[in-house]
Image (cartoon, grey):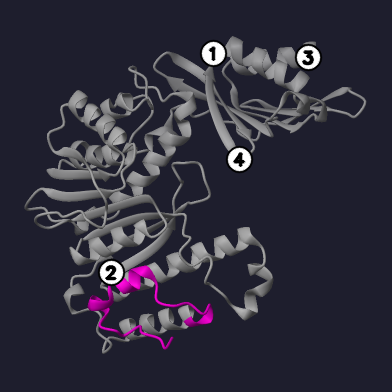
Amino acid sequence: MSEIDDILSDALLGQTCTRLVLSRPRSSAAGDGAVPVRVSVRPVTLAEGLRYQFTTDTDGQQVHSNLDSADAIRRVTELFASTFRDCHVFTTTADFSFRTSRGGRVHVHRSAASQASPPETRHDRLKEHLLPDGVPCPFLQAIGVMTTKGRVRSSRQKKFRQINRFLELVDDTLESLPDDRPIEVVDFGCGKSYLTFALHHLLTVLRGRQVRIVGLDRNPAVVADCCGIVEELGLVDLSFRVGDIAAFEHSGPVDMAVSLHACDTATDDALARAVTWQTGIILAVPCCQQELSSTLYSESLVSLQRHGILQDRLAALVTDALRAELLELCGYRTQVVEFIDLDHTAKNVLVRAVRRPDADEWPDLEQPHCRDRAEDYRRLRASVDLPRTRLEEQLQERLQGILTLPD
């Protein structure tokens, strides 16, 4: 291994390495549990100097760690000897491949450098985030995502990415919010409120807006924890209450309604309440869409529906499609976009709706767009032999009976 040791030392200690990839896991490594399928290494410049960032991919998850040159060399050597058959080292002077044959012999191949310029080592990927790693953020520290020095904890990397993804989706809509008064926000079923605090930070710290945010949840213990964080951070424009979505009343306008992982028809309750309030922006991540699972039927999809897991997924897709159509009919420009779920489940769909300037006139069947969406809704509902949905019933006064189908 002396030749490999020399190459790694020259590349990492000499700071000519632009990238390093370990791949092709050894079957013998499977005895210790989950085996990484790939490890990528790149140089990064942090406050403490040059480090090598290891990104380990294991069963769809990523773990990051930063090591100095000596520790990085030892780590690569250990992984190549015990876990991976291939190692590719890219430097500014040459590229190297270490490959282990079935007989255990290691072959070293050298080729011309694929990147002759010095590596870019700034942490640019993190700077793209609205909340960058390495910059202390009080609310992230309070909820345990970040250390007091501003570093994201390794066990919270996925949560950190999820929070940033949510803020990106919100940030795209802010132009439609009023700028002559505080922004009124209601978060239905806020839970531990990671995203409620993130939303407050985005609007107040990053965008310099005045806000009044209310988080609502049925769990008194969760609400008490959130109130403790509010007190710890000294936030006067963020509050939490115990209550049910359907019974909650809010005085004055609501500019943004958030409903993340409200189970089954609780999402419909939140959407109906938001539409009734004429809320400007609605953000909903539906969860556990079981309302239609037992009643949905399509003769052409019978092979799919005899499998419980596929029936549940079909019910979720149909439910969210119908919700999006109803929001369109109520005067919203609606998108269904990918969202990384906070609970690490497959529920990764976010319904994002922005109220149209002429929404008071909707539904208006004289408008071709409205007429087409109404027909699309009726056609989809009829194709799976559904009765009226809960959300349709809640919005029936607004919809003026245009979606009624014969029973």
Residue 48 in picture, x, y percent from top left? 42, 13
In the drawing, does residue 116 fall left or right of residue 98?
left
Is 118 or 7 nearer to us in this picture? Answer: 7
Q: Residues within 10 Å of mark 3 (few under 14, many from 20)?
A: few
In magenta stretch: residue 238: no
Residue hosting label 1: 68
Residue type beneath disc 1: Asp
The nearer-to-camera label among 1 and 4 is 4
Is 196 or 10 nearer to us in this picture? Answer: 196
Residues in magenta? 382-407
In magenta stretch: residue 403: yes
Q: Choose the circle earlier in sequence order: 1 or 2.
A: 1
Q: What residue sits 56% from the left and 18% below the top?
A: 15
Residue hosting label 4: 60
Q: What residue sits 53% from the left and 77% below the top?
A: 384
Vertically, is 385 above or below 160? Answer: below
The nearer-to-camera label among 1 and 2 is 2
Q: Residues within 10 Å of mark 2 (few under 14, many from 20)?
A: many
The nearer-to-camera label among 3 and 4 is 4
The image quadrant where one finds the N terminus is: top right
Residue 281 in picture, x, y percent from top left? 25, 58
Circle 2: element type:
strand
**In terms of image quadrants, where is residue 176?**
bottom left
Q: Is residue 199 visible?
A: yes
In the drawing, does residue 384 fall left or right of residue 124?
right
Residue type beneath disc 2: Tyr
Whole-angstrom CA distance, mark 3 to mark 2, is: 64 Å
Residue hosting label 2: 332
Whole-angstrom CA distance, mark 1 to mark 3, is: 21 Å
Q: Is residue 130 visible?
A: no
